[in-house]
Image (cartoon, coloured by chain):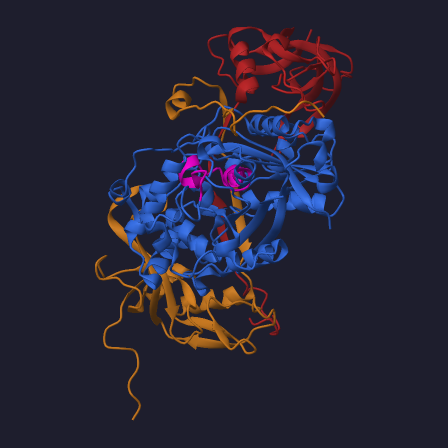
Chain colours: A red, B blue, C orange
Amino acid sequence: MGFLEKQTDPTSPMHWRGDMQADYFYPNGIAGDKFFKHLMENDTFLATKCKPCNKILFPPRLYCEDCFEEIFEEDWMEVPASGKVKLFTKATINAHGVKMEEPKVIAVIEIDKTDSTMLGIIKTNELDKDFSGVRVKAVLRPKGNREGTLKDILYWQVI
Amino acid sequence: MKEVAVLGAGMTLFRRHLKETGKELSFLATKMAMEDAGLQKDDIDMVVMGSAPDAFDGIHKKGENLIDGAAGAGKPYVRVFNGGGTGVFAPIAGWWHVASGVADICLVVCEEKMGNCYPHPQTAFRHIWDPILDRPLNPNLVWLFAMEMNRYMTTYNVKKEDIARVAVKNKRNAVGHPCAQLADPNITVDDVLNSEIMAWPVQRLDISPPSDGAAALIFCNKDIVHKFTDDPIYVGGVGWNIDSTMWTNRDLSFPRYVALAAKMAYKKAGILNPRKDIDFAEPYDPFDYKELHHMEGLLLCKKGEAPILTREGVTERDGDLPICPSGGLLGVGNPIAATMGQKICELYWQLAGKAGKRQIPGDPRVGVGQAWGDIMQMATVMVLRRG
Amino acid sequence: MVEKKEYKEWPPYAPGTHVRESDIREKKITYSWWEPEVQYSWSVGHAMSKFLQGLKDGKLYGIHCKPCKRVIVPPRMFCEYCFGPTEEWVELKDTGEIETFSISYLDADARRIEVPILIGVISIDGAYPKPMGFMHYFGEMTKDEIKIGMKVKAVWKPESEREGSITDIKYFKPLEGGSEQWDF
């Protein structure tokens, strides 16, 4: 069709199908590598303190995004792999929009001894409970099977 | 419109794979630029991020993802992208911020992590082709440049030896650049001519490598630059232009979009005779023939004359018109947008006399940097001058 | 403001940590891996619909932009230079001239191949001004025979195999016998 011709046959404009193929490799970075390597050997997390802001940042980082000061070796510290639920929801559909067989409880957890939170899935039989303020701890893969990714945290459990 | 000066610049190591995340790379480059300028995050008014396709880093909205490392949290911010042209387009966008008066100090950061795309960034390049007309033919990106190179060589009777001289010059120029990925003090024309043929006439040593890296630049308003330095480097002119996507309907032997962008920049900079008024240039050189193609597009010589100037040594660092004194993309590396490090940061370091082993002799006062992007479409040009 | 760092040479150092392919393979650094699966269905558009249908019928179509005096192929609904609507379809010949080419020892996945692929841009007879055409393969010629300016002709797939795609043309081969007869 030229621009000025009327379109009378709705089946005639065609479609072309295709895909985008690529695989991705995401290095964890300087701070991330340190955090995950520690998690492979220990059952605790690492966090970093930003001295100017007087805040404990988690996940740990090389710099504070608020004041932009660099964070050095001596400002890294160990914190427990546990915390308190700040927000939560019961998810019934998965990432593709399909209803899951078993709903999951997703929570934002305030990590102990830090000023930050982390997303986690709580494994529980009480799906409709009010989890606000409930204390939870991370259940990790057995040492030796840990790979250095977030999946080394299998799920969170109510303490 | 306000006059804009450069306060500081920084760049990271360029390598095929770097351990740092994109955010960490942005942080390292920004920190160096701030050290050069003597600034902290609070001194920065606005931030511009330049980064080429999300498909390399593998994070959609990567502009927003990177901002923590680019001192942008809580600040007015914009990401710009036009393929390979981003390396000079991001500083142009930074220039807009200050020239318009909305910001006194603007930070520009460019970052790229091509290594994230597996098995090779070529895979992401498969998706820049038109899905209906080109992709069914399973093209490889190198074919495109090979076709343009062939057309250029045939139209102007250019010999491969003269094109290979560019790769030799740039890889040798890169020796002494701390960030360089492919510096080689011993490379010869024969090495280039004997390297593996990828898609004739393109051979392996004609091509710059994919890289991870970041670069940063800080612009400020002329009214306050005296607080930082007595000998400021100013932005003389900016220009940008894009040509149609229908590349099979265009004459590939001359990049007219580069000439149009250059004219726009030269008009603002008051450059009437580019060959005489400009002291050195950093044209985009992802392939060695592109340096020649772009020299002609930048109106630094007549069409077909660039290989002759290269053969005669005019474009060496100690020649009459040094081209790519940094070592360019062929010598230092090609992390798409972060090539701002060689194209604009280098102009600033040369004009300020801070380029160390790479310093051009004499007293360079005007330099032009250029980047090129998309399917032979986008040209971005910036002129920097001293005083 | 803070104190400037007065190094003599810039950049004064190159921050960043190089990792090699072997470091990644041997898992010396930790990382995540993801294989996205994304599917697309692109609308071809009005002009390309007719072009692709033409290919299925074994014909090449161009479209006329009168103000610019161009017959455009691949065809489009509007002219990108004068920004006016294009009108009047023109049936083009399936012969043309090589504008540029490359001899590739890499296939689409950047793997090395022994027998090179010949690829290039062909200006189609009947479309103007040159260069006016599209990219395609070349066949029935060697890498030493191919040259810019060579006259070529399309080799089509048999009708039953054509699907309305640019690949309905297998490749372009050298044109023998010329394309026009002198008009008495």
Residue pictured at 33% horizontal, 69% vertical: C97
Q: Is residue B248 magenta?
A: no
Front residue (pair C73, A128): C73
Judged by its main secondary structure, the magenta piece is: helix
Q: At which x and y percent is residue B47?
A: 68, 36
Q: Quadrant of residue B170?
A: top left
Q: Is residue B340 magenta?
A: yes
Q: At which x and y percent is residue B285?
A: 43, 46
> In the image, is C33 to the left or to the right of B162?
right
Q: Can residue C107 be seen? A: no
Q: At which x and y percent is residue B181?
A: 41, 32
Q: Can residue A105 be seen? A: yes
Q: Is residue C180 above or below residue A99?
A: below
Residue pictured at 40% horizontal, 52% vertical: B292
The residue most toward the bottom is C184
Front residue (pair B158, B72): B158
Q: Quadrant of residue A81?
A: top right
Magenta range: B324-346
> In the image, is B124 to the left or to the right of B62?
left
Q: Is residue A5 above or below residue B74?
A: below
Q: Quadrant of residue A153?
A: top right
Q: At which x and y percent is residue A106?
A: 68, 22
Count numbered badges in the picture.
0
Front residue (pair B51, C97): B51
